[in-house]
Amino acid sequence: MFMMPHKLLDDDFSRLAVNHQQQGYQLDIKENDKQYTVLVDLPGYKKENLNIEVTDDNMVHIHAKRDDAKTQEGERYIAKERSSAEFTRAFRLQSDIKHDEVKAIFEDGVLQLEIQKVEKPVPKRTKVQLK
């Protein structure tokens, strides 16, 4: 039995499709010597519905909830594609971080976290005298 070439592609790639609610929103993580900067696009979320936590093992947890849009009496949806789901994302940073110096800014639907790194001590070098 032969299949049409485009049908083969459809079958192969259909397994790769991910529900946007399950995948969550994309994020960027940048770093320099002093800090990490995390950017997450969260369109439609409100500041008061965001929860950000940092744990001792350098895990960053971001949780956001968007309320369902309410319909008025006599209204019904013809199409409803906008998600009202919760968003949860967690990731571990490689360097030790200063938990008490995390800044969170939420503006125009973009969450920006500035997470300071713990400064690594400069190795001390001591000359040992031979006797």
Image (spheres, grey):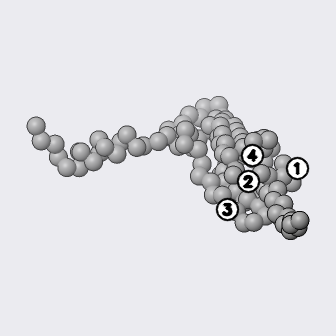
Q: Residues within 10 Å of mark 3 (few under 14, many from 20)?
A: few
Q: What residue lies at 24% left-to-right and 45% top-to-bottom?
A: 8
Give the mark nearest the N terminus, 3 or 2.
Answer: 3
Q: For mark 1, what is the residue? A: 100
Quadrant where the N terminus sits is top left
Which of the numbered marks, if any, corresponds to residue 30?
A: 3
Q: Taking the image as drawn, is residue 66 in sight?
A: no
Horizontal relation, residue 117 to residue 16: left or right: right
Q: Where is residue 112 in the image (x, y as percent from the top left)?
A: 74, 57
Give the mark nearest the N terminus, 2 or 1.
Answer: 2
Mark 4 and mark 3: Cα distance apart in space: 15 Å
Mark 1 and mark 3: Cα distance apart in space: 20 Å
Q: In this view, does 100 lie above or below 70?
A: below
Q: Is residue 89 above or below residue 106?
A: above
Q: For mark 2, what is the residue? A: 95
Q: Residues within 10 Å of mark 4 (few under 14, many from 20)?
A: some
Q: Where is residue 99 in the image (x, y as percent from the top left)?
A: 84, 48
Mark 2 and mark 3 in contact (Cβ < 8 Å)?
A: no
Q: Which amino acid type is shown beneath numbered disc 1?
A: Asp
Q: Position of residue 7 (x, y in %)?
A: 23, 45
Q: For mark 4, what is the residue? A: 58
Mark 4 and mark 1: Cα distance apart in space: 12 Å
Q: Which of 97 and 41 is in front in this view?
A: 97
Q: Disc 4 or disc 3, which is closer to the eye?
A: 4
Q: Disc 3 or disc 2, which is closer to the eye?
A: 2
Quadrant where the C terminus sits is bottom right
Horizontal relation, residue 33 to residue 6: left or right: right
Q: Taking the image as drawn, is residue 60 in sight?
A: yes
Give the mark nearest the N terminus, 1 or 3.
Answer: 3
